[in-house]
């Protein structure tokens, strides 16, 4: 009988340990599921916000309202999307199509550090042939915004985007507005 009691006692201890560990693992998994759900909700809200900004930009373009600056938000990824959408929209207004690459925003070396101006490097490759008049119209339109053209090439390969006309330029951003 002593052997049976020891076996039952060991079995009870193992069962209790398994139940305790199972409860801890279940709570851990429930916490992870809750975190994932919260993350998905935040991402959905961010996506809706960016879509709203994109629609607002498209509405302004289609209604003919002039923008004084490219819309910006606190999210760097959303800013890249808005910048790309703006450049594509600007090109379509001029009757052109092209490929746009937007790099990450960084501190500008063109201004003293006291001024705190950031820059967003952009590369644009216009796929169709462009007339001289359209090119001048594009340059005139770019003057309305804080852009600085670094490289302008027709048929060259200095700018690493596909297209007949290729531009590499910077958009200057003053953090906090202005």
Image (spheres, rainbow, N blue to C red):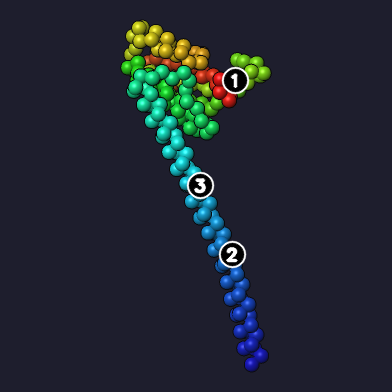
Local secondary structure at mark 1:
loop
The alpha-carbon separation of the residues under discs 1 and 2 comes to: 51 Å
Q: Residue at position x 36%, y 26% from top?
A: 59
Where 114 sits versus 76, above or below?
above
Q: Nearer the viewer, mark 3 or mark 2?
A: 3
The alpha-carbon separation of the residues under discs 1 and 3 comes to: 32 Å
Q: Residue at position x 56%, y 67% from top?
A: 22
- Along the viewing direction, whichever of 177 and 36 lies nearer the viewer: 177
- Along the viewing direction, whichever of 124 and 44 lies nearer the viewer: 44
Residue 160 pos. (x, y %):
46, 21
> What's the mark number on residue 39?
3
Q: Which residue is mark 1?
A: 117
**Mark sitting earlier along the chain (3/2):** 2
Q: Which residue is mark 2?
A: 24
Q: Residue at position x 47%, y 23% from top?
A: 70
Count of numbered labels shown in the rendering:
3
Residue 125 pos. (x, y %):
41, 19
């Amino acid at each position: 009988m002593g052997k049976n009691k020891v076996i039952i006692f060991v079995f009870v201890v193992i069962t209790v340990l398994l139940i305790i560990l199972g409860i801890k693992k279940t709570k851990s998994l429930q916490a992870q599921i809750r975190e994932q759900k919260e993350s998905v909700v935040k991402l959905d809200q961010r996506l809706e916000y960016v879509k709203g900004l994109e629609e607002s930009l498209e509405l302004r373009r289609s209604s003919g309202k002039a923008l004084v600056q490219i819309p910006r938000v606190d999210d760097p990824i959303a800013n890249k999307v808005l910048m790309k959408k703006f450049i594509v929209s600007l090109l379509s207004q001029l009757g052109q199509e092209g490929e746009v690459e937007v790099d990450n925003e960084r501190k500008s070396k063109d201004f003293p550090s006291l001024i705190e101006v950031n820059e967003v490097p952009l590369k644009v490759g216009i796929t169709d042939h462009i007339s001289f008049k359209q090119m001048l119209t594009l340059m005139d339109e770019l003057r309305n915004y804080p852009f600085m053209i670094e490289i302008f090439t027709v048929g060259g390969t200095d700018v690493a985007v596909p297209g007949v006309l290729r531009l590499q330029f910077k958009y200057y951003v003053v953090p906090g507005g202005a």
